[in-house]
């Protein structure tokens, strides 16, 4: 279900100023920027507009989400003025190798967010396959990519890339207290959310340009450098047949699949739930 049509709010001055300062680095992002004080999901807003013909480059930002979501249908805790909740409309299908560019989109996004956070705050976050950022095993940020499927052709024509970053000192629900963290918790100081948002968009634009230009090795190398748990970590996962397997991570392949040493074989995990033990 897509987000119901609602007029956006005025973009706060601090966000407008931060975006203007990074204007040359944002292309093709920011062709239109919509800001909402509260929505159900920024991904749903972007999806509705994509289905209506909105071109690539749309950015949707919310101060709060009432129905934010992550991978596999999980909810994303999105309280007001405490995080960055952003969705982008992208068209990786225009790359020279569209299938590979689309497959590596979340890998590129994870690198971009980690780079932006380190540039703006100095904090080095680890990437955890496939698309989460962690600090000391606690989640800092997440990414969700959803294809835009044409009802007529039944093909994916573009992708909504949503991301959430925990910024402020928020009070987490009990089930998240020991599993989540934020930039201000880790750094012990306040963070300029507008400047960070502009930095994330600039970093996304750079890594998206790598995807479109076929510079996949640059993305994969950067991801591997920031993902220590992708090698030597113990994991469990469930196969498509329902059986439970375990092994030790052995990196990712050139399509972003997680490689796991299980017995004498290397297993290739493309999707599904992986438990890190």
Image (spheres, rainbow, N blue to C red):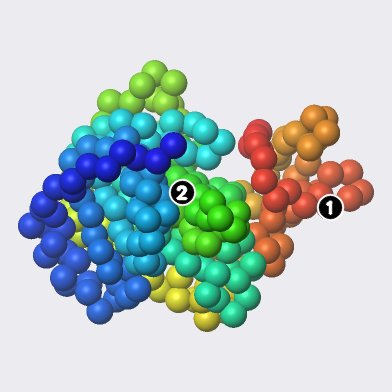
Q: Position of residue 259 (x, y in %)?
A: 74, 53
Image label count: 2
Locate the C terminus by quadrant. Answer: top right
Residue lying at 56% horizontally and 36% vertically, measured from the top left = 72
The residue that disc 2 covers is 143
- As drawn, the residue found furthest toward the right would be 264
Q: Are marks 2 and 1 in contact (CB under 8 Å)?
A: no
Which of the 4 image quadrants contains residue 182?
top left
Q: Which residue is mark 1?
A: 266
Kindly indicate the quadrant of the structure image that contains residue 224: bottom right
Q: Residues within 10 Å of mark 2 (few under 14, many from 20)?
A: many
Q: Does dot 2 land on a helix, a strand or a loop?
A: strand
Q: Is residue 161 left or right of residue 12?
A: right
Residue 66 percent across, percent down from the top left: 31, 31
Task: Compute the Cα span from label 2 to label 1.
Answer: 27 Å
Whether residue 218 is visible, yes or no, is no
Q: Is residue 11 left or right of residue 230?
A: left
Instruction: Tell which residue pokes out farthest to the left in this image.
Output: 13
| Circle 1 SS class | strand
Task: State the image coordinates of residue 71 (x, y, percent, origin top left).
Answer: 53, 40
Determine which quarter of the picture holds residue 183.
top left
Mark 2 and mark 1 lie on one chain; the one further toward the N terminus is: 2
Looking at the image, residue 51 lies above or below residue 187: below
82 sits to left or right of 180: left
Q: Residue at x 40, y 41 (%)?
A: 2
Residue 17 pos. (x, y %): 11, 65
Comparing 76 with 92, the one in front is: 92
Residue at 70%, 38% in the rendered image: 235
Neighbourhood count class around disc 1 (C-alpha, 10 Å): few under 14, some 14–19, many 20 upward: some
Closer to viewer: mark 2 or mark 1: 2
């Amino acid at each position: 279900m897509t987000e119901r049509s609602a007029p956006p709010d005025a973009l706060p001055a601090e966000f407008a100023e931060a975006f203007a300062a990074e204007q040359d680095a944002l292309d093709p992002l920011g062709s239109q920027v919509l800001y909402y004080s509260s929505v159900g999901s920024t991904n749903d807003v972007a999806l509705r507009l994509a289905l209506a013909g909105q071109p690539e480059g749309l950015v949707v930002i919310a101060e709060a989400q009432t129905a934010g979501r992550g991978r596999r249908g999980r909810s994303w805790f999105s309280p007001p003025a405490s995080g960055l909740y952003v969705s982008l409309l992208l068209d990786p299908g225009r790359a020279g190798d569209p299938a590979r560019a689309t497959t590596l989109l979340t890998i590129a996004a994870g690198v971009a967010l980690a780079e932006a956070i380190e540039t703006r705050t100095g904090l080095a976050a680890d990437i955890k396959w496939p698309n989460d950022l962690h600090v000391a095993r606690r989640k800092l940020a997440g990414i969700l990519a959803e294809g835009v499927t044409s009802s007529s052709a039944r093909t994916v024509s573009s992708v909504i890339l949503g991301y959430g970053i925990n910024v402020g000192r928020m009070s987490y629900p009990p089930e998240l207290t020991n599993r989540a963290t934020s930039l201000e918790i880790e750094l012990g100081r306040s963070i300029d959310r507008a400047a960070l948002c502009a930095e994330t968009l600039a970093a996304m634009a750079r890594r998206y340009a790598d995807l479109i230009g076929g510079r996949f090795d640059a993305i994969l190398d950067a991801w591997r450098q920031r993902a220590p748990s992708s090698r030597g970590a113990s994991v469990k996962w469930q196969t498509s047949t329902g059986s439970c397997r375990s092994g030790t991570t052995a990196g990712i392949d050139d399509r972003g699949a997680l490689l796991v040493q299980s017995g004498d074989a290397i297993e290739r995990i493309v999707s599904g739930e992986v438990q890190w033990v």
